[in-house]
Image (cartoon, rainbow, N blue to C red):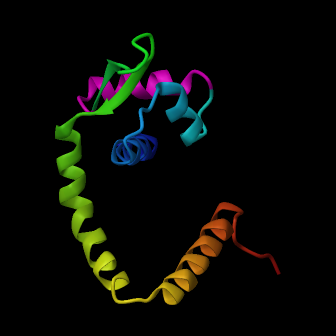
Amino acid sequence: MHPTDVRALIALMDARRAGAEMTAGRLGAVLGLSSAGPTALVDRLERAGHVRRVRAERDRRRVVIEVEERAVEPGRAFFGPLIERPVELLCAYDERELAAIRGFLHGAHEAAAAGGGTTT
């Protein structure tokens, strides 16, 4: 599976967990895709059976993208063990320690996003 497809499924799962609807346009914005990119991405994921297009509950004119349950299970099987142990470890820290960990991870993420390396 293409890395963008995986990122899209993760973004869709995050939206699902938050109870938010995700349109193709919003998905494209989250992933930083060009204007035609989201449609091609959703078409590809839909053909593979990972997502479906459905009408929005509040505004039936809008089309939202939902993850098919059969796409969720392989992700849980693969990522579940990778996530469960770190979550268990984090439960042992107090709020002050968690704030320090968050600060470090945020800084590391920003450094990676900016290219992170230095030249000598």
Residue at 71 percent across and 62 percent down: it is 114
Image-based side of 51 in relation to 118, left or right: left
Residue at 40 percent across and 24 percent down: it is 64
Image quadrant in which the N terminus is located: top left
Is 28 placed above or below 94 here? above
Q: Position of residue 9 (x, y in %)?
A: 36, 42
Image quadrant in which the C terminus is located: bottom right
Magenta stretch containing residue 36, yes or no? yes
Instruction: Look at the magenta stretch and give its main secondary structure.
Output: helix
Q: Place residue 100 in its image quadrant.
A: bottom right
Q: Place residue 106 in its image quadrant.
A: bottom right
Residue at 44 percent across and 29 percent down: it is 41
Q: Position of residue 85 (x, y in %)?
A: 27, 78
Q: Position of residue 7 (x, y in %)?
A: 44, 46
Q: Position of residue 55 (x, y in %)?
A: 35, 16
Magenta stretch containing residue 48, yes or no? yes
Question: Please, which residue is most extreme toward the right here?
Answer: 120
Is 53 placed above or below 99 here? above
Q: Place residue 31 in its image quadrant.
A: top right
- Where does the magenta region start and end? 35-50
Residue at 42 percent across and 38 percent down: it is 20
Question: Please, which residue is most extreme toward the front here?
Answer: 58
